[in-house]
């Protein structure tokens, strides 16, 4: 866990709960260890985080409403639609959806977001805290939107969202149930499919050979 994530997430009430439930000493040790690593704030995405993000075909994004209620929305697309622009910046073209605009309105009120990225097959998850800025309604925004659009995407992109990363943390894999997309299943089953085709071809060859013997 990076120092910056602990600074944001471990509020006084959180620390008090950790003390009451017996886990505070564990996280306190991590925090002290991170304090000694002055260059490791945990606010810059490294190679493993960047690769993980680029392989995702969806993520969950939480925003904060005017009434203080959290709101979580799923964003999906082809792998790589969430772009790593630099170690502290993410961006994506926000496609037209159900036109409720709850997340958009929330971001006009409070720019803080939490991203939750899941890799179900490998039971991995990455949490990112950041601040999002909406770009829309002018020529500069249109240029940015086009630069973030995925090739072949037909849905209308209404805006670009640029997220400045404040902190991130890898979450424990415990209790993640492995799930697989059609693409992932097809890749996993490809050797079996090839083997079945080979067996079918061999069976056909043997049947044809047997038929010729019967004719003779």
Image (cartoon, rainbow, N blue to C red):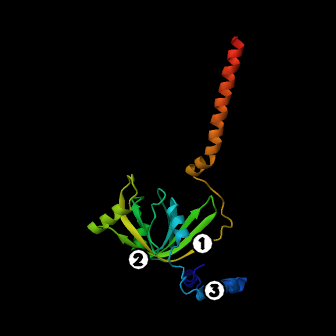
- In the image, is 130 to the left or to the right of 175? left
**x and y percentages locating residue 128 in the rendered image:** 52, 73
Residue on which disc 3 sits: 33
Q: Nearer the viewer, residue 204 or 15?
A: 204
Residue at the spot 40% in from the left edge and 68% down from the top edge: 161
What SS does tag 3 mark?
A: helix
Which-is-in-front pick, marks 1 and 2? 1
Counting other residues with Cα less than 10 Å from the Cα at mark 3, is it few (<14), some (14-19), or many (20 or more)? few
| Residue at numbered disc 1 | 170
* Drawn side of residue 78 relative to residue 27, left or right: left
Q: Nearer the viewer, residue 133 or 170?
A: 170
Earlier sequence position, callout 1 versus callout 2: 2
The quadrant in which the C terminus is found is: top right
Q: CA distance from mark 3 to mark 2?
A: 36 Å
User: Residue 109: which numbered mark, if any?
Assistant: 2
Residue 138 visible in the shown view: no
Q: CA distance from mark 1 to mark 3?
A: 17 Å
Q: Quadrant of the N terminus?
A: bottom right
Q: State whether residue 36 appears in this view.
A: yes
The image quarter in which residue 151 lies: bottom left
Say what secondary structure mark 1 lies in: strand
Residue 128 disc label: none
Kindly check if marks 1 and 2 are in contact, taking CB atoms under 8 A apart as contact: no
**SS for callout 2:** helix
Give the alpha-carbon distance from disc 1 to disc 2, as whole Å: 28 Å
Q: Is 195 situated above or below 83? A: above
- First along the sequence among labels 1 and 3: 3
Identify the residue at the far left of this view. 139
Task: Pick whichever of labels 3 and 2 is earlier in the sequence.
Answer: 3
Q: Is residue 179 above or below residue 215?
A: below
| Image location of residue 93, percent across then percent down | 39, 63
Residue 116: quarter of image: bottom right
């Amino acid at each position: 866990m990076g120092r910056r994530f602990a600074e944001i997430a471990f509020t006084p009430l959180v620390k008090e709960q950790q003390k009451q439930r017996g886990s505070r000493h564990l996280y306190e040790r991590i925090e002290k260890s991170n304090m000694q690593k002055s260059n490791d704030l945990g606010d810059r995405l490294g190679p493993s985080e960047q690769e993980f993000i680029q392989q995702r075909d969806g993520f969950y994004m939480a925003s904060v409403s005017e009434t203080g209620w959290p709101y979580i929305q799923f964003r999906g697309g082809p792998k790589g639609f969430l772009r790593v622009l630099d170690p502290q910046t993410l961006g994506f073209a926000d496609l037209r959806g159900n036109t409720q605009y709850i997340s958009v309105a929330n971001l006009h009120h409070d720019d803080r977001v939490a991203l939750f990225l899941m890799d179900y097959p490998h039971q991995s998850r990455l949490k990112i805290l950041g601040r999002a800025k909406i770009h829309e309604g002018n020529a500069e925004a249109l240029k940015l939107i086009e630069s973030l659009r995925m090739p072949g995407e037909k849905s209308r992109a209404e805006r670009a969202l640029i997220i400045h990363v404040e902190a991130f943390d890898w979450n424990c894999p415990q209790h993640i149930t492995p799930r697989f997309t059609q693409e992932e299943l097809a890749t996993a089953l490809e050797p079996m499919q090839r083997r079945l085709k080979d067996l079918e071809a061999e069976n056909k060859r043997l049947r044809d050979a047997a038929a010729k013997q019967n004719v003779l």
